[in-house]
Image (cartoon, rainbow, N blue to C red):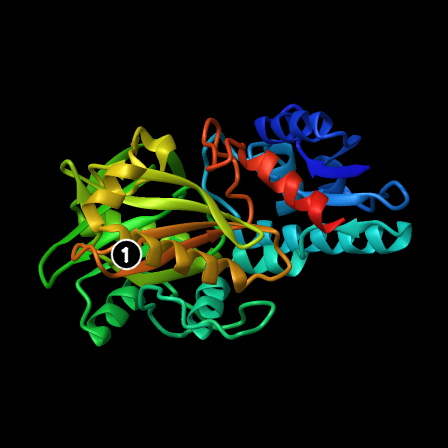
């Protein structure tokens, strides 16, 4: 029996359940709404899979401990959400222990991957190539306790001290490019490229990438994001393919980088939901060369190995403009939703994970 902590009816829950049942597993879905709201129980001896709590406004509200749901697309309460998420993961651990259930994923790994500062620090400590980050650096601890970047003026001061003109500003607990700002700031002007929509009262995650040239507006965005925690990385110039920059989403399952998606864009944000396009893996391999491509995949395996309690990790890897260097941009605990992407054995991401599970159980 697999107990799936997920959102019933979501693509993730539906696709995994179908694959698991086809492989001969019984599946029971435990809704994230229940996990986010209080204590839960698992069937005795179940294998517990934790999936994404995203795309459910009520789950988001409960994790943030808010009285009302956020407005659609509103970027709000990232730090409160993270505290609620960690508390929910702790309830999952307690429930599994009480019922003799086995966790398939280490909740501690998941928590680290949902704090970009901690994940960056863990990767850097393992000598995995990552972009440089502004201090204060995240400690190698279970929770970030540093002061962080307090706002736009502190960000600009940090950039000047480091000698950087271009950075990526990322909410510490964000996902899907929500709140990410690609900033080019000189002495007299600032240019921000972001999917953030700035209004008088709130910030919203939009499907349209915008350009802000008013430093007042750029400062307002950063100042509103800062209280929930920021991770700031030096801009890593990415290689291009047919006039579009690209990066790779690589899903590593039990140490095997079997599923690769090329994400291409005419803006610095390559996330596919922003209207960007999938590229051709063979074209990338031809562009950068077989040796550089295999080296990039090897780095993804090393990045995933930094989370030994996670049987699968989604790694976002950037290829440098020189086509030889590369760096890990993100690691994703729930980076396996890749519809239509098959590995060399013709397996979906869920089929590959279930076969690996069968070999371990």
Residue 197 appears anywhere in the view: no
Asked whether, in this view, residue 169 is left or right of residue 38, the answer is: left
| Local crowd size for mark 1, using a 10 Å CA cut-off: few (<14), some (14–19), many (≥20) | few
**Quadrant where the image shows the N terminus:** top right
Figure check: 67 above or below 108:
above
**Position in image of residue 60 (x %, y %):** 60, 39
**Position in image of residue 38 (x %, y %):** 79, 45
What residue is drawn where x is 61% and y is 27%?
15
The residue lying toward the viewer, choosing from 295 and 234, is: 295
Residue 214 appears anywhere in the view: yes
What residue is drawn where x is 53% and y is 74%?
140
Asked whether, in this view, residue 57 is left or right of residue 292, the answer is: right
The residue lying toward the viewer, choosing from 117 and 125, is: 125
What residue is drawn where x is 50% and y is 31%?
346
What residue is drawn where x is 20% and y is 55%?
323
Q: Which residue is mark 1?
A: 291
Figure check: 349 above or below 81:
above
The residue lying toward the viewer, choosing from 346 and 96, is: 346
Figure check: 154 above or below 71:
below
Asked whether, in this view, residue 206 is left or right of residue 244, the answer is: right
Asked whether, in this view, residue 333 is left or right of residue 193, the answer is: right
Figure check: 9 above or below 226:
above
Secondary structure category for the residue under label 1: helix
């Amino acid at each position: 029996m697999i107990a799936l902590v997920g959102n019933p009816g979501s693509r993730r829950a539906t696709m995994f359940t179908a694959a698991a049942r086809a492989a001969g597993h019984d599946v029971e879905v435990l809704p994230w709404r229940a996990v986010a709201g209080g204590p839960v129980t698992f069937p005795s001896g179940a294998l517990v899979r934790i999936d994404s709590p995203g795309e459910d406004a009520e789950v988001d509200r409960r994790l943030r401990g808010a009285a009302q749901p956020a407005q659609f697309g509103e970027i709000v309460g990232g730090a409160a959400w993270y505290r609620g998420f960690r508390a929910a993961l702790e309830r999952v651990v307690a429930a599994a222990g009480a019922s003799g259930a086995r966790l398939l994923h280490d909740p501690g790994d998941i928590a680290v991957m949902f704090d970009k500062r901690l994940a960056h620090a863990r990767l850097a400590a393992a000598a995995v190539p990552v972009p440089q980050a502004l201090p204060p650096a995240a400690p190698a601890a279970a929770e970030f306790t540093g002061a962080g970047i307090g706002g736009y003026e502190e960000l600009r001061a940090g950039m000047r001290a480091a000698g950087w003109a271009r950075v990526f500003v990322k909410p510490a607990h964000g996902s899907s490019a929500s709140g990410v700002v690609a900033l080019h700031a000189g002495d007299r002007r600032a240019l921000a490229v972001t999917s953030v929509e700035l209004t008088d009262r709130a910030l919203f995650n939009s499907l349209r990438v915008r350009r802000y040239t008013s430093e007042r507006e750029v400062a307002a965005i950063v100042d509103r994001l800062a209280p929930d925690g920021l991770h700031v990385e030096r801009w890593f110039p990415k290689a291009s393919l047919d006039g579009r920059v690209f990066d790779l989403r690589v899903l590593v399952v039990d140490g095997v980088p079997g599923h690769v998606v090329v994400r291409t864009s005419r803006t610095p944000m390559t996330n596919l939901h922003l209207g960007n396009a999938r590229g051709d893996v063979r074209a990338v391999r031809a562009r950068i060369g077989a040796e550089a491509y295999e080296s990039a995949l090897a780095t993804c395996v090393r990045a995933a190995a930094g989370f030994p309690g996670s049987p699968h990790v989604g790694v976002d890897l950037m290829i440098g403009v020189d086509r030889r260097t590369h760096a890990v941009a993100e690691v994703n605990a729930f980076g396996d939703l890749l519809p239509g992407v098959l590995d060399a054995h013709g397996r979906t991401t869920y089929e590959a994970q279930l076969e690996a599970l069968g070999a371990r159980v």
